[in-house]
Image (cartoon, rainbow, N blue to C red):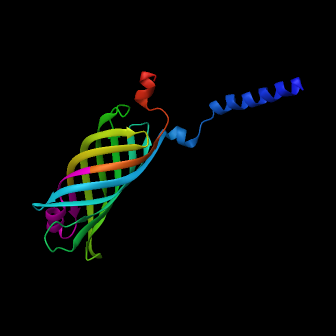
Amino acid sequence: MKKQLLVLVYVISSFSIFAQSEKTVFHNLGLTGAWGGWSYNATINNSSYNSFNGGIWGLEFGKTLLVGGLHYTVPDAAINSNYNLRTNSLYLAYLIQSYKPIHPLVSLAIGGGSITQNDISTGNTVLVLQPAAGVEINVLRVCHIDLQGGYRAALTSNNTTYANTNFSGFYAQLNLRLGFSWGHGTEYDKRGW
């Protein structure tokens, strides 16, 4: 009985030793987190204040790079206007010293969209560029909040004046991201904690 128990302990311990050296596809990519949440925006377009919200999601790589998507609808701030800008953008964010509770970040959202009138497409396709910089707060391991400021440039091949005048402008953005971050990033590995 003693010999069988000793063999069982040996077999179980050998599994754990081999499991520690196993590499996975996601490990090779440096995937360290997954996030999703809400994005609240305030903007001044054509001398009018406007606010709207949307959704944000992303995968975190090496605790420093967030790659994902950003979706929202921007209503025209003009009075009695039924025009909206709907966009789906690639979202890239670089988190600087993300191991700190409060740290800076820079981001870029770039993607296509369309201008709609009364929820019907006008046929105007738009390229939206949104560079921004801000600060992120690691509230909990599963909850991060960031505040950013930047400029939204809505560029279109037709009706350019309307898109540039009514949808381009400076904006402030508040993102609430829920998810989880695991593993170690480059700063963590350098510092050894």
Answer left or right for 184 relative to 133: right
Please say if 93 is above or below 121. above
- Residue that protrudes farthest toward the right in the picture: 1
* Quadrant (top left, top right, bottom left, bottom right) of the C terminus: top left
* Location of residue 40 with respect to 122 vertically, above or below: above
Image quarter of residue 5: top right
Q: Please, which residue is most extreme toward the left here?
A: 47
Q: Is residue 111 magenta?
A: no
- Is 168 colored magenta in this rendering? yes
Q: Is residue 21 visible?
A: no
Please indicate, yes or no, whether residue 75 appears anywhere in the rendered image.
yes
The residue lying toward the viewer, choosing from 46 and 130, is 46
In this view, the residue in front, 101 or 117, is 101
Q: Quadrant of residue 102?
A: top left
- Residue 85 occupies quadrant: bottom left
166 displayed left or right of 137 = left
Residue 81: percent from left, percent from top = 17, 73
Q: Residue at x 18, y 70 (%)?
A: 159
In this rendering, position of residue 23 left or right of residue 5: left
Tell me where the magenta segment starts and ends, as one range. 153-173
Instruction: Return the x and y of residue 112 as percentages of the image width and height.
Output: 31, 62
Task: Note whether 46 is above or below 34 in the view shown.
Answer: below
Residue 190 at x, y = what percent?
Answer: 42, 23
Q: Is residue 94 above or below residue 5?
A: below
Question: Which residue is painted at 44% across and 32% down in the image?
Answer: 185
At a point 20% along the width and 53% down the height, the residue shown is 171
